[in-house]
Image (tube, helix red, strand yellow):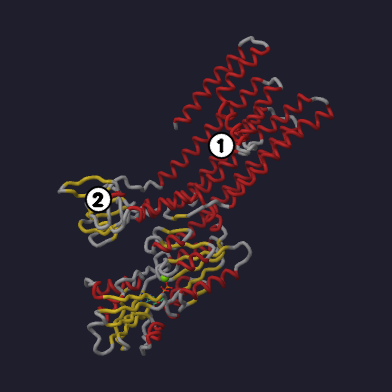
Amino acid sequence: MSKKQKQTLWRILASAVLLAAAVLLPLEGWFRLCAFLVPYAVIGWDVLWRAARNISHGQVFDENFLMALATLGAFCIGEYPEAVFVMLFYQVGELFQSYAVGKSRQSITALMDIRPDYANIERGGELVQVDPDEVSVGDTIVIKAGERVPLDGVVLEGKSTLDTAALTGESLPREAEPGDDVISGCVNLSGLLKVRVTKAFEESTVAKILDLVENSSSKKARAENFITKFARYYTPAVVIGAVLLAVIPSLVTGQWGVWVHRALIFLVISCPCALVISIPLSFFGGIGGASARGILVKGGNYLELLAQTETVVFDKTGTLTRGVFELSALHPAPGAEERLLELAALAESYSDHPISRSLREAYGKEIDAGRVTDVEEIAGHGVRAEVDGVPVAVGNDKLMERVGVEWHPCHRVGTTVHVASEGRYLGHIVISDEVKEDAVQAISALKAMGVRKTVMLTGDTRAVGEDVAARLGLDEVHTQLLPAGKVERVEALLKEKTGRGKLAFVGDGINDAPVLSRADLGIAMGGLGSDAAIEAADIVLMDDKPSKIAAAIRISKQTLRIVRQNIVFALGVKLLVLALGALGMANMWEAVFADVGVSVIAILNAMRALRAGDR
Ligand code: ADP
Ligand code: MG
């Protein structure tokens, strides 16, 4: 419990005792009024103060105003004990609310508890703990068993297993050995690791994730904006309603006391707290629950879009396939046997494309990047560079046409990478990729979630693209596309979809950023993908598993269902009690109770969103 909550609790107790005293003492007239004003001031001064301050700021109609008006009104008509009780009850409700909100925020932060506290650095032969902020790129840090990896880097020494659950939601531990990349936020389970830091803390995976999650509440869902607007019209409408209720029947019947009292009850009932608190809390819960599963959603509005997904468009390499190509054939032109793979690996040495990484891996030897200059990466084509001062082109058929070199087609199914140098064809390398383990299941799960169309767009050849699409059961496939062609295709698909349906694009981010931002929803693979994609995307899948898209849709649907339940429930009960109050069938006690009760139930319901998708 926070300090402020404790204070409120003491005030509630003090005011309750003073109120009991006021009820028991045999006082009359002004003395009696003063005896009740004391507990009222103890419990209600902050509400009165906020109401007065808001009025002076021009924001007249809020719940503080409603409570102040209702209770001061009760004093005016001589209902002293009731006035104090209403305020007391209201504060009990507020205390409960703030406690529940605090609790659920805590559980979300606990889910996101990946911020490292320190990093171990060797200084003069001794290990010292420093703030991760103070470590610079190139420094060597030591991570002991049980500690959290504080910064992104490469393992220099040691072997261990890492628990990536906090980042990816997967409990399967990952092995780490010298040469492997480790990302911050994982927990080192067994051995001692020496790691060379490759990114400063602000650039590290942990810092980026925390940033995303912390900023996610600034992107409001439509339902949240609706509540803000709703409150702006609702409160004045209720106040006008109360005035009419006090005046009109009184003029007719002459019973001013009865109708003013009913109008005051009407005011107490009308506080829209349940809605105002529970709806943002539900979205917050949905986002928190998704991040615990390795799905980062950058705002409540994206959960809303996700629930309406009708078309899912995939990139191939790195998204549906692993992006780890195996060498399946080397076909050098006569005389180029020795150099084919070496030239390809060297020319590709600066690129992050999965093909480049795989060629470097296949080459296997240390690469002297100093031999490579003038690198030009041409999206959807390949790479041109100078190796030892000699121009080299490595890429597909289109690139060969572009540099004007005759090439030989290959009979093998796979991605063919041609190599040419100084206008001479040196042969080709055939590599092939595997579909991800969960890709088939990912597509069928999407269908089961009501997605109408699944499409794959790829820059790869027709043979490879159609083979993958057939194996995964995709509805449509478009091959040999350049990045601009992918944007065009997505635009055509955007036109095809029906009314409210949304189109999601899923990519690994290597030259996907334009499509990611063009689609209604951009989803990026976070583990493999590039930083640009993570920034352009609305949703990031930390463990690169396409099956997480269906999981994300399920979470979004459940969160929205909870939001709708809360809106219907809170407004329904409100309207019912308002009607009863107007008819004189509910007293002020019941009114406050209804308000507090509805808020509590709505908050508890909202907290279910944290566990959305568990089923
Ligand atoms: P995808 O749409 O499957 O993600 P890309 O658009 O990234 O593929 O690339 C399309 C094609 O362009 C690849 O299949 C490959 O033939 C060629 N290509 C792109 N980048 C490279 C590269 N760095 N090296 C060699 N070939 C490349
Ligand atoms: Mg790609």
Residue lying farthest to the left in this orientation: 125
Q: Position of residue 460 (x, y in %)?
A: 42, 77
Horizontally, residue 58 falls left or right of residue 347, namely: right
Task: Identify which amino acid the numbered label 1 is placed on.
Answer: Val
Please, what secondary structure does the residue beneath circle 2 have? strand
Find residue 593 and report its image quarter: top right
Classify mark 2 as within 8 Å of ligand 2 or not, answering yes or no: no
Q: Quadrant of ligand 1?
A: bottom left
- Answer yes or no: is residue 345 visible: no
Q: CA distance from mark 2 to mark 1?
A: 45 Å
Q: Position of residue 376 (x, y in %)?
A: 35, 76
Q: Residues within 10 Å of mark 1 (few under 14, many from 20)?
A: many
Residue lying farthest to the top in this orientation: 26
Between label 2 and label 1, give the one nearer the viewer: 2
Q: Write down the residue under mark 2.
A: 143
- The circle on residue 600 is 1
Which residue is painted at 40% across and 44% down in the image? 110
Find residue 548 and report its image quarter: bottom left
